[in-house]
Amino acid sequence: MDLKTALVYEGSAVAILHFDPQTGQVLPKGYHSWAFQQAVSAQDVAKRAQEILGNLEVLNGAEYREPEACWVVPLAYQGRIVAELRVSYDGTGIVPDIPATQEMQAYGK
């Protein structure tokens, strides 16, 4: 079971936060829970995501990804990288996460 929420900017998902379906805690980027049942409600996760959003830290550093022609900036919460934000190669805009936006439009609430 995958429990996640999108960070939305100008109507598009720009980053994804993954949550543990048993505890509702945000998971480090790349880590996925192996739970088969959801013990927390979607409303609790939405509330938790709002708290986390206000405490996200943009880390000092970026990685350039040539195939996408963008900079990837890590976002941390309580000392753990929990998401990445893509910034255009010239630094003028945020690059949407197209697969996440499509998933949000298809299944999101």
Image (cartoon, rainbow, N blue to C red):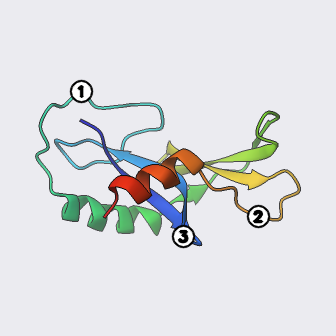
Does residue 63 appear left or right of residue 9 in this picture? right
30 up-or-down from 60: above or below? above
Q: Can residue 77 be seen by looking at this rendering?
A: no
Do residues under tags 2 and 1 come within 8 Å of each other at their CB atoms?
no
Residue at 70% of width from left, 61% of height from top? Answer: 94
The image quarter in which residue 93 lies: bottom right
C-alpha distance separating marks 2 and 1? 35 Å
Circle 2 residue: 93
Q: Can residue 14 be seen by looking at this rendering?
A: yes
Image spot of residue 41 (x, y percent): 15, 57
Q: Secondary structure under badge 1? A: loop
Image spot of residue 29 (x, y percent): 48, 37
Does residue 11 appear left or right of residue 38 in this picture? right
**What is the number of the mark on residue 11?**
3
Residue at 51% of width from left, 60% of height from top? Answer: 56
C-alpha distance separating marks 3 and 2? 14 Å
Image spot of residue 48 (x, y percent): 30, 62
- Which is closer to the viewer, label 1 or label 3? 3
Few, some or many residues within 10 Å of mark 1 (<14, 14–19, 20+): few
In-front residue for pair 108/4: 108
Q: How many marks?
A: 3
62 up-or-down from 5: above or below? above
- Which is closer to the viewer, label 3 or label 2? 3
**What is the number of the mark on residue 103?**
none
The earlier-in-sequence mark between 2 and 1 is 1
Q: Secondary structure under badge 3? A: loop
Few, some or many residues within 10 Å of mark 3 (<14, 14–19, 20+): few
Q: Secondary structure under badge 2? A: loop
**What is the number of the mark on residue 34?**
1
